[in-house]
Image (cartoon, rainbow, N blue to C red):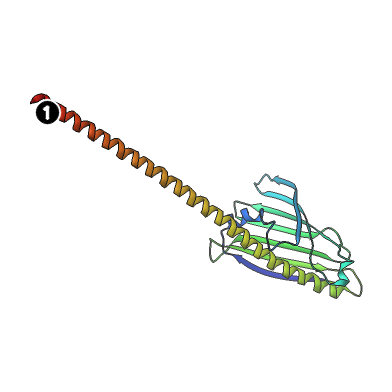
Amino acid sequence: MVKYLLGQSVLRSSWDQVFAAFWQRYPNPCGKHILTEDIVHREVTPDQKLLSRRLMTKTDRMPRWAERLFPANVAHPDSIVDPQNQTMTTFTWNINHARPMVGEERCVYCVNSDNSGWTEIRREAWVSSSLCGVSRAVWEFGLAQFKSNVTKSLKGFEYILAKLQGEAASKTLIKTAREANEKAKETALAATEKAKDLASKAATKKQQQSLIV
């Protein structure tokens, strides 16, 4: 038997910003359950889509009965990025402990239909177990972990987006300050040169007048 869960979230940032933040999500204070994340394969398809395969090791707090079944969790996330249509689809599933529980997740990141400056995330999850006697507990545990990780993921996204946007704003302010400083120097230099020119002309005129007299 398979348990199915469907959800939808919105990030108040553009698709481009979310796409950039996606590859910089970890580490973050809300994603401490993610131990490692490595890209093991990447390619660009003939139709200009970016395919990536990552290997992720994570840990989650578990009830005592599950600790022997799930001592560690290794996930296999794949992603397909379509920059032309501004969509990113991710697929994640566990590659170990498949007998106690198989958890699969599919997320689609796209431009929000109500606000083009926002990004919509559509999530689907499937949890199944082949264990007899404890399958219900495994399903409930898997769905609870899915909901918990969705919350952590969104908070982590918001943290990284705020950090990236803050850095961008800081760089803009620094650049603006530098440009203003350079402009001020140019204005001061031009004023000095003009004052020298006026003083030189005044001196020349005075000298000419003294010669006439």
Q: Where does the image place residue 75, in percent across and percent down from the top left?
A: 79, 58
Quarter in which the N terminus is drawn: bottom right
Q: Could you say which is closer to the camera, residue 121 or residue 146? A: 146
- Helix, strand or loop under label 1: helix
Q: Is residue 51 shown above or below 109?
A: above
Q: Residue at 91% across / 75% down in the picture? A: 133
Quarter in which the C terminus is drawn: top left
188 with respect to 145 (left or right) = left
Amino acid identity at mark 1: Gln
Q: Residue at 74% across / 63% down in the picture? A: 105
Instruction: Determine if residue 1 is in view.
Output: no
Q: Residue at 67% across / 57% down in the picture? A: 25
Q: Which residue is mark 1?
A: 209
Q: Is residue 63 shown above or below 168?
A: below
Q: Where does the image place residue 22, in percent across and percent down from the top left?
A: 65, 56
142 with respect to 183 (left or right) = right
Question: Looking at the image, which residue sits at the far right?
Answer: 132
Q: Is residue 140 shown above or below 24?
A: below
Q: How many marks?
A: 1
Where residue 114 sits, quadrant-wise, is bottom right
Q: Could you say which is closer to the camera, residue 94 or residue 194? A: 194
Q: Where does the image place residue 20, in percent across and percent down from the top left?
A: 62, 53
14 with respect to 66 (left or right) = left
Q: Residues within 10 Å of mark 1 (few under 14, many from 20)?
A: few
Where residue 165 sits, quadrant-wise, is bottom right
Instruction: Determine if residue 62 is in view.
Output: yes
Q: Residue at 85% across / 66% down in the picture? A: 101
Q: Could you say which is closer to the camera, residue 22 or residue 199? A: 199
Question: Looking at the image, which residue sits at the far top?
Answer: 211
92 with respect to 13 (left or right) = right
Q: Could you say which is closer to the camera, residue 39 or residue 99? A: 39
